Image (cartoon, rainbow, N blue to C red):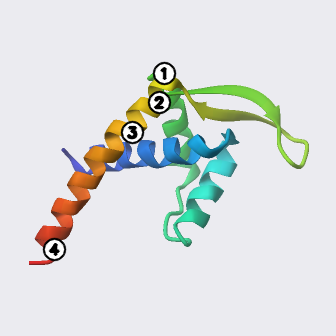
């Protein structure tokens, strides 16, 4: 798995996990990831929006137009049933992978 594949898979997983809580527009996803990570994860628009579109193309997320808190029109995303199943299986894979990396780094 290349570094970019690892980042793409991880970003998709983080987005799906964030959308599991409630439908969000792109800016809301980025803000939630930043807040949930204590400011460590700051995903640039150039990575975030292509990831949201990729999740839609794969059938893992779907979108609908709505209004933000400020009244602006925006696309809100939410995971599909397939996206939730993907989130569950990939979360298990991530836990195994991150545990292995922690073991190696701890040596």
Q: Secondary structure at mark 1?
A: loop
Q: Residue 70 appears at what percent x and percent y?
A: 89, 49
Residue at 54% x, 36% y is 52
Tag 1 residue: 59
Would residue 70 appear left or right of 10 to someone viewing this image? right
The reply to whether residue 54 is visible in this rendering is no
Residue situated in front as seen by the camera: 60 or 45: 60
What is the spatial separation of the Cα atoms under label 1 and label 2, in whole angstroms? Answer: 7 Å
Task: Identify the secondary structure beneath mark 4.
Answer: helix
Whether 103 is drawn above or below 77: the answer is below
Mark 1 Cα within 10 Å, few/some/many (few <14, many 20+)? some
Instruction: Classify mark 2: residues with Cα within 10 Å, few (<14), some (14-19) or many (20+).
Output: many
Residue corresponding to mark 3: 88
SS state under label 3 = helix
**Residue placed under numbered mark 2 in the picture:** 83
Report which quarter residue 103 is drawn in: bottom left
Residue 30 against residue 8 in the figure, above or below? below
| Mark 4 surroundings within 10 Å by alpha-carbon count, few (fewer than 14), some (14 through 19), many (20 or more) | few
Q: Position of residue 25 (x, y in %)?
A: 69, 41
Outermost residue on the left side: it is 107
Left or right: where 83 falls relative to 24: left
Write down the quadrant of residue 32 in the picture.
bottom right
Residue 100 spot, x, y in % from top left: 16, 60
Dot 4 and dot 3 residues touching (CB under 8 Å): no
**Element type at mark 2:** helix
Q: Which residue is mark 4?
A: 105
Mark earlier in primary sequence (3, 1) = 1
Q: Nearer the viewer, mark 2 or mark 3?
A: 3
């Amino acid at each position: 798995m290349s570094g970019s594949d690892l980042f793409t898979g991880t970003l998709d997983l983080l987005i799906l996990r964030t959308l599991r809580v409630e439908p969000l527009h792109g800016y809301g996803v980025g803000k939630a990831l930043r807040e949930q990570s204590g400011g460590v994860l700051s995903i640039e628009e150039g990575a975030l929006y292509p990831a949201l579109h990729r999740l839609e193309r794969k059938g893992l997320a779907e979108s609908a137009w709505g209004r933000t808190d400020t009244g602006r029109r925006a696309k809100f995303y939410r995971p599909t049933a397939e996206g939730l199943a993907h989130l569950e299986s990939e979360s298990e894979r991530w836990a195994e992978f991150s545990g292995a990396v922690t073991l190696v780094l701890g040596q």
